[in-house]
Image: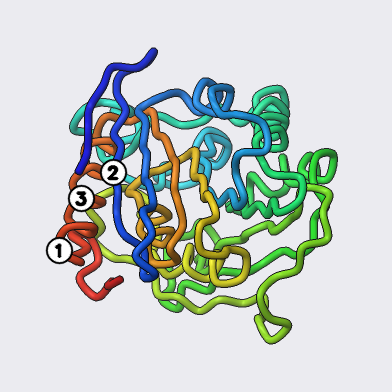
Amino acid sequence: MNSLSPSSYAAELNFEYKSKDKKLRTVAIQRNDVISFLQGLPDNSIDVLVTDPAYSGMNNKLKLGKGRIVGKYSEKGADQAKWFSEFEDTEENYNLFLSECKRVLNKETGHIYLMFDSFSLLTLGALVREYFDVKNLLVWDKVNIGMGHYFRRRHELILFATNGNTRKVSSRSLHDIWDVKRIHNSKYPTQKPVEVFERMLEASSMPGFTVCDPFLGSGSAALAAIKYDCNFIGCDISEQSFNLCNERIQEFIDNNIDILEKSSKK
């Protein structure tokens, strides 16, 4: 079931599903600005925050060759654009973002996974230490080679940290290089495989935890949360993202079908 109601920005959708132990869990998504969304969440309300911010730095600064990475950058944010509105990742904005993440992340259980491209890691990564206890820099090996101006990219980086607590990950046998194939010909730009978020939740979630992704994108984190019997809340400023996630989450809950990754099952 889902319900639609107006919010300060545009819309909110709420879903319910039964976990493996037959308990009722909730999934909520908003169309909203990331800061407004986080400011609307209660203190200490999130157990695990997993997200891939729509960093602007690489596209704004790296102007080699064709310069832009996906689609027609001049059309970003338009209804039919292949690209999307980005988070202007100035130091001021990123500090505000991190301070809100720290406030909503539970002090006893809170784990956070922040994805970075190489440009944003060098410009913003050090700021994370001012808010969280950084534990690891994880490497997502995409297996298949991608684009690049000099050396072609085959990986992305994920910073893992805790919110001042000593809660461990689920197993000491987990390693820091994740070989998960990238998605080709995706329906949403920079769509991440559900398995990448599953790796995060395998390490950091427990049934009934609340997982948050404030840069929802294609909704892959929401599906991973459902697979791990968690509650989920997320947002994205893009109408395209909001509508796609509505369809994707509903179909997954109702029919155990992932409309964007056919091999993904509950």
Residue at the spot of label 3: 250
Can you tell which mark lies on residue 15? 2
Residue at image position (46%, 31%) is 86
> Is residue 92 left or right of 165 when viewed as pictured?
left
Residue at the spot of label 1: 255
Which of marks 2 and 1 precedes in the sequence? 2
Q: Quadrant of residue 111?
A: bottom right
Residue at image position (60%, 29%) is 42
> Do the residues under discs 2 and 3 have CB atoms within 8 angstroms?
yes
Can you tell which mark lies on residue 104? none
- Who is closer to the viewer here, 192 or 58? 192
- Who is closer to the viewer here, 80 or 200? 200
Q: Secondary structure at mark 2?
A: strand
Q: Secondary structure at mark 3?
A: helix
**How many numbered callouts?**
3
- Residue 56 seen in this snapshot: yes
> Do the residues under discs 1 and 2 have CB atoms within 8 angstroms?
no
Q: Secondary structure at mark 1?
A: helix
